[in-house]
Structure formats: structure tokens, C-alpha cells
Amino acid sequence: MIEDNIERLRQDLSATLDADDNDAILEILDGINVAEISSLLDSLPSQQRDLLWPLIDPLLLGAVLLETGDEVRDNILRELSPREIATIIETLPDVDDQADIILSLPTEKLVNILHTLDAQKRKKLESVLSYSDDTAGGLMNIDQITIRADVTLDVVLRYLRIRGEMPDHTDQLFVTDRHDHYLGSLYLRDLLTNDPEVLVKIIMRTDVSAMHAHLADTEVAREFENYDLVSAPIVDEQHKLIGRITIDDVVDVIRDESEHSIMSMAGLAGEEDMFSPALVSAKRRGLWLGINLLTAFLAAGAIGIFEDILDQVVALAILLTIVPSMGGIAGSQTLTLVIRGIALGQLGSSNYRSLIKKEISIGILNGLVWALVVATFSVFWFENYSIGAIIGFALLVNLITGAFAGAVIPILLRQFGIDPAIAGGVVLTTVTDVVGIIAFLGLATLVLG
């Protein structure tokens, strides 16, 4: 239903953009929300995107940019002046959101924008920008409510009334000492359901652990998932409270990680612009096509070694693709499982060996079953028991190899600092192709040659 609505909007908007009917475009934009505008920007060709951008409500531009894909955002920001970007940033109330946009900019433009902001805003932004964007510090928002432990709940309630508002996604108030060291949390439900004369220190939660500012964003997401958090305090090296992370930021991390895993399996950027210039996309994809071509030549070279035996037995040429293909599928299943385990933090030095043993066992079991099936089929097809035995044994070897390689390759790549989601498939395909071909044709050479 949502997809149908976006498609209708895209069709209507494309027609009005082509007709250069600004009034109709503004009418469409007035009837949709920020997420829908961002989705339209992501899915429109660059020429139409350029026409749409100036017509978006200036007060929504920052929120729209936050929702668009990274590359689309970068392309838009590249065309804006530092003053225009600073104006857009001013529309965002949360410092972490402002930092997300600033971090997309080249260093020179980033510095220019910081100089256009007043001292207080610049200081807040710099406190977030001092941390990498893939850490808790880079995700945090410094807009949080702190209270003291030695006051009553009635004092806290009066303080909140004076404030008049609370930051979004506030489910707890953070308790600190006079030096801003984090002591614990007071949940709003406890504040509202206890006697107003009770001291904060009596009912505050001291078991709510703060996250360190340098904690990786994936670990932050895992903590939110494990403990069903809505928000969490962030502390520095001295255990001073410096900000908080909220669930909306964590959802973005989870989405980015899932998109990265899916896209990188094909060698693509996590949020690649669908309508980026063809030359830019061709360069990115050409790299992985080139790597794949090298591995294909390696497999072809392995086949060439057995040219003589292939000339003698046509059946081998007919059956040749079965063994590498089956090994590749088996390896891909294991590879996907291991990459997911690494991403979720479920795999480490303590359980690598157990997983490898299990995957090898699966390879043996599946290998025996499917080797028998393929061997039987081959015997009936070619009326040659030797051919059946050769392909059956080769298939068993390659299914075991695929399972072992699928488990080990991501671990090795990670140790070398290479993303397994990007390079794992290429390496695995090479291994299963070469081993499958050598096992099948090598055994055929020994038996039939």
C-alpha cells in the first residue's frame, strides 16, 4: 500500500515537473510528509530532482536531507553554498542531526559553515563532531535533562513544569553529581507513580549502565535490542555525562547496517544513488567485474589443464558445471550465516572452531546425499559407472570444501581488515570453482585417462 502511494506520487510529480507546473508541484508537496519527500528525491532522475529541490519548504530541508540516501544527500550539498547549508542546519533542533549533515561535507566547507554559527551552537556541534560518526559519541544528542540525587520528586516535577517541554524520546532523566558524573537514571514512570516527597536517590535506577562515547554504533544497536531501550546515557573517559542516544538514531544504524550487508554482497555502496551518473556507477561496478574476470580466468585455466581428457570424454564436458555450482551454493549458505553472525557479534574466537566443525559436518551429510543422487543420475544417463563414481566423489569433496571455505573466509578477511560482505562472495566463488574443477577433472584423468 505504501509503495503504491509513493508510485502514484512519483507519477504525478514527474508529470508536473515535466510540465513545469510549479503550482501543481507545490500542491503535491503540501500534501505529503518529510519521509515521502525524501523517498521521491531518492527515486527521481537527477534532472527532476534539481527542479524539485528549490520548491521544498525551506523549514523542511534539513529533515528531508536526513531521510535521503547518503549519495543523494552528498550530491545536493555539493551544489549548495556554506551559507545555504548553515541555514538548513539551523532548521534542525537536534545537534546529532546537524552533525550528520555536516559530516557529509568536505573539510573546507565544514570549517566555513562552523564559522557562520554562533559560539554556543558551534561548541555543541564540535562536541559531537569530535567523535567518529560510527560511535556512540557520533550518534549522541547533547540535549538531555539532568537532575541531582538529593532532591525530592516534587522538586523534579516543578522543574519540568518550568521547562515547559522535554526532548523527544525522553523516557528517563539522568542523575548526576555536581561534577556531572553519571550516577543513575530516574524513569518518568517512577517519577509519576511515587510519593512526591521521596528523594530521587531512593528510587533512581543505578543498574542502568551508561555507554562509553567511543562504543561502536553496532554495539550500541545491540544494547538497545538486548535491553529494549528507548534512550541511553553516554559518558566520556571520566564517566561524565555528555549526551544521550535515542531509539530513532539506533533504527537508522540498524537500517544502514542491513542495507550495507545486502548491497555490499554485490559490491555496491550501502546507499548508492540509483540515478548517479552512469560513468560514476560504471567505475564502481567495473572494479568488481574486473576482479570477477580474474577469478573466471583462474577457473578457465584449471579447465585448460585437463583439455586432453575433455576431448576424449564428452560426458565430462556436459557434467562439468554441476560440481562447482553445487559447491558454490553450499558455500554461500555458510558464508551468509557467518557474515550475519559476525555482524551481530555472535561469532568470536571462542566459538569459531565449533561453527567450522558443524558446517563441515553439514557439508559431509549433504555431500553424501547429493553425491549419491547425482552419481545415480549420471550412471543412468551415460551408462557408465566410472562417470557416476567420479562426479559423486568430486561433488562430495566440493560440498565439504564449500562449507569449510564459507566458514573460514569471512574470519580471515576480517582479520586482514577487509569487509567479508564485500569480498567474501568473490573469494568463495573462486575457491569452489577451482577446487570443483580440479577434483572432477583430476579424478577423471586418473580413472579414465
Image (cartoon, rainbow, N blue to C red):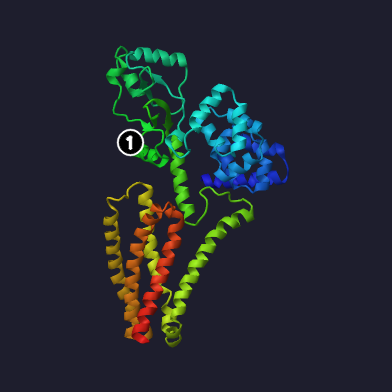
Q: Is residue 229 above or below residue 427?
A: above
The residue depicted at 52 percent of the width and 29 percent of the height is 126
Q: Which residue is mark 1?
A: 227
Q: Nearer the viewer, residue 271 or 295?
A: 295
Residue shown at 49%/53% (left/top)?
A: 263
Q: Position of residue 150 (x, y in %)?
A: 32, 14
Q: Is residue 332 above or below residue 44?
A: below
Identify residue type, mark 1.
Tyr
Residue 298 position in % (x across, y down)? 47, 70
Q: Quadrant of the C terminus?
A: bottom left
- The secondary structure type at the circle numbered 1 is helix
How many numbered marks appear? Answer: 1
> Quick check: 165 left or right of 230?
right
In the displayed orientation, state which residue is furthest to the right.
20
In the figure, is residue 401 to the left or right of 24?
left
Position of residue 166 measured from the top left corner of the image (x, y, whole percent):
45, 22
Return the x and y of residue 16 as percentages of the image width and height: 69, 43
Note whether residue 380 is visible: no
Front residue of 95/120: it is 120
